[in-house]
Amino acid sequence: MTITITRVREEFEQEEIVIPFERQTVKNENLPEGESLLVQPGENGIQQVTYRRLIENEVETSRSIFKIEIIKEAKPEILMIGIQSPFVPIEIPGKLAYLTAGNAWLIERDTRQRRPIITFGDLDGRVFSLSPNGEWLLFTRKSNTENEINSLWVINLDQENAQPINLNAANIIHFAEWLPNRTATILYSTVEPRPTAPGWQANNDLRRLVFNASGRVVRDESIIETNAGGIYGWWGTSFHISPSANSIAYSRPDAVGLVNESDGTLDPLITLLPFQTRSDWAWVPGVEWSPDGKVLFLVNHAPMSGINEPESSPLFDLNAYILPSGPLVKLVSQTGMFAYPSMSKVMKENQTWLAYLEAIFPEQSENSRYRLVVMQPDGSNRKVIFPTEGGTGLDPQKVVWSPATSSSIQSFVGFIYQGNVWLISTEDWQPRQVTGDNLITRIDWK
């Protein structure tokens, strides 16, 4: 008998690979036309690749990648190019953040004072939210990891040279938001990636995440466990936190209700007629809280007489639901499905406004552009403030309001029009264009 002994050992070998930086060009109307300014010099990143080597009798028989780790993120070169600017600078309260070409920028004090916050170019816009005190920005980044759509991050806006912090939460499509009156506390909901459209199966869950001053997650706990989510539950549930953080509302294609945090259940308030999209998306009603938390403003799908399929009705109304048990009051008929009510911050009595979008073609509101309308919360004093006569309407979006300050004598409503930020003051209701790069997709203001 012949016995052959093969001596086998396993070794790991590491190699560092340079990640070349990208070059980005940003238009800026504050620079004279033809001039350029290097906002950020580019820096190469470093990627560490760990190989697994299998050696038999001192001969390498296999070599495979065991792990890939980004040691240093590449920082893109950002070159600002001046373009002609007709825009008059506007003094604003608080901080206004906007997302353009996958990067985050911040405006403070007046609309000329802008600085880049995140320049990786991979923000997907699913989540883009300033903390209530304006200290942090919460956002999602596209992910290259298998079975991961995106990941949740924060960055401190008050800390010089702050670096983005990964909160180790992934696959967030519909909801992640700051909890008011709490320090560094976030509520979020997740999905499971799928190869078929729309690309996910919603978990319809709700989780609470708390991190400390350095960004380390100290708690990540479940409020609502994964559930079917009702009719069209595969799409997902949205959540809406009251200004006092005492209540959380939820909205989904078939219902609007409240989250019962004590036992982890959903208590429906209103049963909705789901809208049949006949596609790979589902309609979820826009919802907004009144400042005192006693009223929910919501878009309701209304039936239409004379059609065989009620779910195909093109009628959508803006309603107010008086808590705790009703009634449901119709404020405006046929606003369109993407009305997205938005309440201004409280200043003085009778100075609170409810903004919403109104479809130019209400019976085709799925594809229609929209007008921007404001009114008092009781439905009185209604006025269309954008666009001007003959102008092109807005794409569906939830507009944002400026924060209230002790010296505020007016409020601003901010929105995106043709890829730029526009502001309208409650003092004169005149629209003013703020940016001119035509690439902006998300804004927030705190």
Image (cartoon, rainbow, N blue to C red):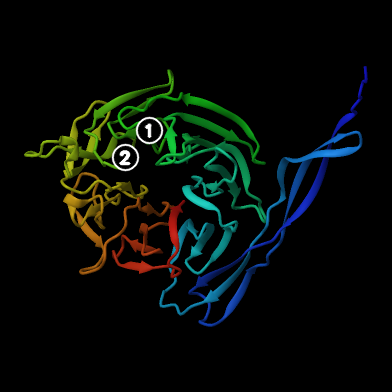
Where residue 418 sits, quadrant-wise, is: bottom left
Which numbered disc covers residue 225? none
Q: Residue at x 83, y 42 (%)?
A: 13
Say if residue 183 shows up in the picture: no
Q: Residues within 10 Å of mark 2 (few under 14, many from 20)?
A: many
Q: In this rendering, is residue 401 above or below 301? A: below
Q: Amino acid at mark 1?
A: Trp
Which numbered disc covers residue 282? 2
Apparent side of residue 118 relative to residue 228 in the rendered image (left or right) = right
Secondary structure of residue under mark 1: loop
Mark 1 or 2, nearer chain start: 1
Q: Amino acid at mark 2?
A: Ala
Q: Residue furthest left?
A: 306
Q: In this rendering, is residue 267 above or below 292? A: above
Q: CA distance from mark 1 to mark 2?
A: 9 Å
Residue ID for mark 1: 234
Q: Residue at x 87, y 31 (%)?
A: 9
Q: Position of residue 352 (x, y in %)?
A: 30, 49
Q: Position of residue 213 (x, y in %)?
A: 64, 40
Apparent side of residue 85 relative to residue 275 in the rendered image (left or right) = right
Q: In this rendering, is residue 204 above or below 77? A: above
Q: Position of residue 396 (x, y in %)?
A: 32, 53
Apparent side of residue 334 relative to residue 340 in the rendered image (left or right) = left
Q: Residue at x 56, y 36 (%)?
A: 169
Q: Residues within 10 Å of mark 1 (few under 14, many from 20)?
A: many
Q: Position of residue 152 (x, y in %)?
A: 55, 42
Q: Closest to the observer: 58 or 396?
A: 58
Q: Residue at x 40, y 57 (%)?
A: 408
Q: Closest to the observer: 254 or 221?
A: 254
Say if residue 320 shows up in the picture: yes
Tag 1–tag 2 contact (CB < 8 Å)? yes
